[in-house]
Amino acid sequence: MAGFNKTNITPPRWLLAELTYKCPLQCPYCSNPLDYAHNSSEISTDDWKRVLSEARKMGAVQLGFSGGEPLTRPDLPELVKHARELGYYTNLITSGYGLNEAKIIQLKQAGLDHIQVSIQASSKDLNDHLAGTESFQHKKEAARLVKKHNYPMVLCVVIHRKNIHQMAEILAMAEELGADYLELANTQYYGWAHANRDLLLPTREQFEKAEKIAQDFKKKVEGKMKIYYVVPDFYEDRPKACMNGWGTTFLTIAPDGVALPCHSARDLPGMDCPNINDYSVTDIWHESKAFNFFRGNEWMQETCRSCDEKDKDFGGCRCQAYLLTGDMYKTDPVCRKSPDRQVVQDAIDAARDSALSTDEKPLLFRNSKNSKTF
Amino acid sequence: MTINTALPINFSPMHRLQWEEAQQKDVILYPEGMVELNQSSAEILKLCDGTRNLDQIVADLEEKFSTTDLKNDITGFLEVALNNGWIQQN
């Protein structure tokens, strides 16, 4: 953007490799694009290796293999091996579905550092309902095998209105499975979660009750388990410092090779996100329109422009501003200072009405059939 | 938690200590996270290899940097490291 000094560009530290949109599960809060089924192309093993090498050379050090379900890519062990040789800290972010002991050993030998397993709920019925697939026992077994083979393990549970009442049981499950870290990820309302927001957004009372249970547990397990708590920003006074600032730290590569400053950025209008088939990673990071679009704070309008907290939260999330107000330049409306804050209250009220209604509509599950309607 | 002076100290197998060329510094890597280290912190952690206790680490570093009086600083840092899970004593 005009006025931004390109000499201030910091190198990427975090590379998120979304290897595929294929996934055996159908979670209704998936962060993948709603229309993912129209875009099934995937870049090759050699393309991925080149991207990993280039980003590592620039300074990226944390690498997440994600998706979709990354285990559906048969070249995953080969990519892990390449990444580990380059010196990345390699994270596998998986549903656990399809993760058996032979695969765990194979990935360990390839140099995988850490496995994050997601579980949808603390009970079989609810887990299998939310995942759209019978998977609860398999996931728990996968988590046990991850620990058996001495990986650090993050257990990730996405929290929303359908499972927030299970908070105490979810914490007990994490302890029983031997998780080193528990990520309690309050749902962020993008992609499929945005489409299902009325059915997923908890009430403030539900959220506060669950948070208290989680905070008490955090003290109890201090020194044994760390809790990563992703706050539900609809109930906050200030927006999150999204992506640690646009184009400062995070680089996401989508399955088709499109490079994204955040995983929802391709939904923003006029972003023209570049593809690794056309440019080097260095060119993408430094020169592309997309990565420079919201760098620095020259792009800001009021309320952010004159705010003394603009260097702390960077105006919040551009995708949330766009989804909720239709204008991606506006202050993230979860901010109490935003003149658009009412849209967040309206969303909270609509979700509460939905929860109280006697004929609540069904969840829209993330699968190819539903995706093709977008 | 405090350091047990009798026991050797080792770096946690759940973390990785690594030199980062692009940043020109040592870092600790762990699931989805990173801590950047200054030079003295990195020097201390590199000696946490399971063969030395606190006094031996202090002695080695005082000799390496031809100085004395490092014990308080090193103890303070190692307690931070222990409480963050970067090191352990079995």
Image (spheres, coloured by chain):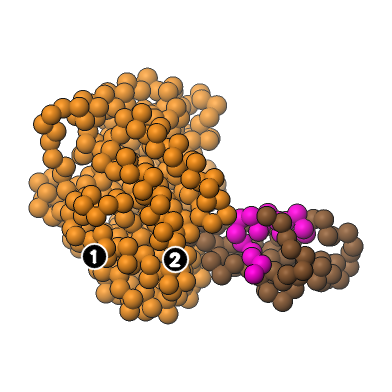
Chain colours: A orange, B brown
Q: Nearer the viewer, residue A297 or A323?
A: A323
Local SS, label 2: strand
Discs 1 and 2 share one subunit: yes
Residue stretch rendered in magenta on the structure: B74-90
**Splitting the image into 4 quarters, where does residue A20 fall?**
bottom left
Q: Residue at x 48, y 76 (%)?
A: A85
Residue B32 seen anywhere in this rendered image of the structure: no
Residue drawn 57% across the image and 54% down it: A223
The amino acid on which the numbered mark 1 sits, given as a three-letter code, is Glu
Q: Position of residue A227 (x, y in %)?
A: 48, 49
**SS at mark 1 in the image:** loop
Asked if residue B14 shows in the view, the reply is yes
Q: Camera-side residue: A6 or A148?
A: A148
- Contact (Cβ within 8 Å) of mark 1 with mark 2: no
Of the numbered discs 1 and 2, the one sitting upstream in the chain is 1
**Alpha-carbon neighbours of circle 2 within 10 Å: few (<14), some, or many (≥20)?**
many
User: The N terminus of chain A lies in which quarter of the figure?
Assistant: top left
| Residue A162 pos. (x, y %) | 25, 41
The mark lying in front, picked from 1 and 2, is 2
Q: Residue at x 40, y 61 (%)?
A: A177
The residue singled out by tag 1 in the image is: A42
Subunit under mark 2? A
Q: Which residue is mark 2?
A: A114
Please name the residue shown 61% across and 55% down the image: B84
